[in-house]
Image: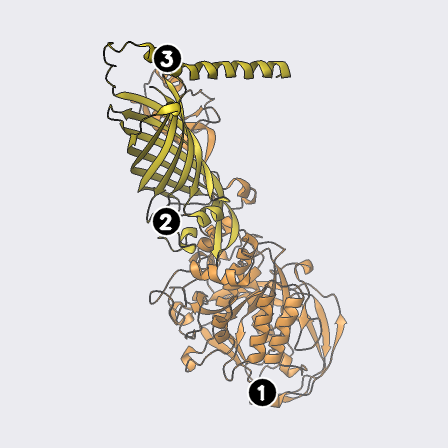
Amino acid sequence: MTVLTRTRSHAAAFIGVALWLVTIAAQDVIPPASSRATTARLGLPGIDRGLRPDAEARRVRKATDLPARRATAGARYLPGSVIVKFRRGTPAATEAAIRTLVRGRATADLSYATFQIMALDQDADPEGVAQRLAAQPDVEYAQARYRVQPLFTPNDPLYSLQWNFPALDMERAWEINRGASSEVVVAVLDTGMAYRNISFDQSSIAQTIDNVFYPSLGTVHLTFAAAPELGSADRFVAPHDFIWDDATPVDMDGHGTHVAGTIAQLTNNSVGVAGMAFNVKLMPVKVIDGFWDAYFGSPFIGTDDTIARGIHYAVDAGAKLINMSIGRTGAPAPAVREAFNYAVSHGVFVAVAGGNEFLDGNPSGRFAELAPQIDGVVAVAATARDRARASYSSTGPYIELAAPGGDSTRSGVTGMIVQQTYDFDFTDTFVNGATGFRPPRFDMFEYIYYQGTSMAAAHTTGLAALLLQQGITKPAAIEAAMKAFATDLGAAGRDDQYGYGVINPRATLRGSGVVR
Amino acid sequence: MTVAAGTRCVGIVALLLVAVLAVPDQAAAQERRRPAASPPAPRPQTVVRAFGDLGMTFFTASDTFDAVLGSPMGVVFGGGAEVVLPQRLFFSGRVSHFQKSGERVFVLDDEVFPLDIDTTVSITPVEVTAGYRFHARGRNRNMIPYLGGGVGWHRYDETADFAETGDDVSKTFVGYHVLGGAEFRMGRTFGIGGEAQWTTIPDALGDEPGSASAAFDESDLGGISFRVRFIIGR
């Protein structure tokens, strides 16, 4: 099982991409299952430690918060009036005569206005009247009072680091659909999610993982907290853990929390970063394990069966969209194929990461390669900040779409995707082997850069949520709409690198008219 | 309006109709009384007339219009002028207008997903027609059938919410039409007619991949129109 690549930045330089491989063969070295005892259902809230100190300095963007304007956003101009400017020296009598010509009426002067607002009948055509006025020699200019549409720029202070959203023209897309709604439930099948405050007492034993020996830490008090930027408890529905076989799918890795952030990070809340579909509800479904799950002896690890069960569970629990920023190479996956078919047949759309193995021989992603065979399941490649295919992004006939996944080799650390997840200084104490090995804390959060087709899939799921809210309710139609309006990159038409192209949220949300 | 007043109105209208319809018959009666040696009837003259009309258009691209505007048809009104030559040839110019609002959609396999984005389509054709007016004969001499055909320039505008530069459509397409109808003379200067017109505006739709017309593989903006004409003039 391949947990798609995650990369983090460090003080002097970017340390590298942490690629987590859990193979099917790893089942042979599953440590004995151990239990975990909940010691506190309520814990302290998570601590948001901000952006990693070595990342780009914060540049706070001016907030534009005009949520109440949605209802009138479509009107092109105000009826019943026009803007007109008479030439200097035009006698009042002439102005009055011109007003009479178009059945207009004078209005009170406005402050700071070098022009006048001329009132018209409500059923008058302001554009036509403006044309007639502009034709008068005593009129310098005249125009309808066109409505100005404010672009929705989230006021999250680190939004300026999220190149990926402007790259997708999300600010204009959010004008059409502002983050979907709580009626849309998105299941994130991943390493779990930092969705609640809870503590466990967890026993441990010494063991070797990936050929590295780790000593026993004894009984460890594990503290988990909800990621502050994922929202309050009522945002999460039907959580389930297929790794620990319980209903508490806390994230012991950080990957799932990061992916959930791209999909649905709290947005326009003046904190941290933004997400695509920031009003949806999230269903945390833990189907793959991280290092600590393995170390503490989870009864299951991420295999095809946990994936398939997770899909079935999410469908039955009411999810309408499933994000699978996971995959593997190797033998075919009929159990997952069946689960995909089950999802789509129940009206659930699935986005699958296309795979990060291009530089490792570009083997087929076994989950991703199912996507073209099932309408309503899409496989997503990753693009870099410069819109080129990310260097790691797998290619093949199964790639259907592309989305930002970041690529540090092309654009540096800030060319990756930043979202909130755990502060790895407190979770990844295992990276140096036994040196510095100590119990993790899962209540410290930072804004961290990841890259991978995991991130690309999450963008696609976010768009799917917006489309579902907008009215495209069938999985096959969501997929078809994304393909139809994708921005074609690479070879003309579908190709193995970008599929049908990079997702185009605004165009897809606007859909079709008669001619255009 | 009371019942009595309504009855009075209907009565007045009926009397007027009888009076109008009686005019040609009186003229015919006068002709019958005319002695054989009387001078020949005056030569037919070239006549210029104005008309207005109101009707329905059923679009050829029925699936597309049904998807976006909620109906494959719509009300069209118009008007114009025509010249009738002594040889019973006529030439007309007509301007009409169709406008209807709906919402943008996504179409997959003929299934339509409305997207809650308001859109308005308007079509303003300017058409010129040449045709022939047949002789009115026998008992139906007040009814004049005619046939014609011509060319039109169809201004097409499509606007939608959230549109920015380049999103809305404003194009003019050339189309061709044939029409036929019958005019009923209600008096010396007034007539009512019924008219049917078939219009083709080839290749106006369907060339933009993301459009509903492309999804339905419909390319003709024309359709069949049925309308009532009100003619002012001889």
User: Which residue is located at x 49 percent, y 49 percent?
Assistant: B67
Chain designation of label 2: B
Which color was chain B given? yellow
Q: Where is residue A129 in the image (x, y as percent from the top left)?
A: 38, 27
Q: Which of marks 2 and 1 is in front?
A: 2
Disc 3: which residue? B29
Q: Position of residue A498 (x, y in %)?
A: 40, 68
Disc 2: which residue? B205
Q: How far apart are marks 2 and 3 (CA)?
A: 56 Å
Res B231 → quadrant = top left
Callout 1: SS: helix
Chain designation of label 1: A
Res A179 → quadrant = bottom right
* Label 2, residues with CA under 10 Å away: few <14, some 14-19, many ≥20: many
User: Is there a contact, CB below 8 Å, between mark 2 and mark 3?
Assistant: no
Which color was chain A given? orange
Disc 1: which residue? A26
Name the image quarter holding the C terminus of chain B: top left
Q: Where is residue A277 in the image (x, y as percent from the top left)?
A: 55, 57
Q: Which of A394 and A493 is in front in this view?
A: A493
Residue B39 lies left or right of residue A208; in this view the side is left
The disc labelled 3 sits on which kind of residue?
Ala
Q: Which of A105 and A495 is in front in this view?
A: A495
Callout 3: SS: helix
Residue A346 lies left or right of residue A167; in this view the side is right
Q: Which of marks 3 and 1 is in front?
A: 3
The disc labelled 1 sits on which kind of residue?
Ala
User: Mark number for residue A198?
Assistant: none
The disc labelled 2 sits on which kind of residue?
Leu
Q: In this view, does A489 lie above or below B93?
A: below
User: Which residue is located at x 56 percent, y 42 percent?
Assistant: A68
Chain designation of label 3: B
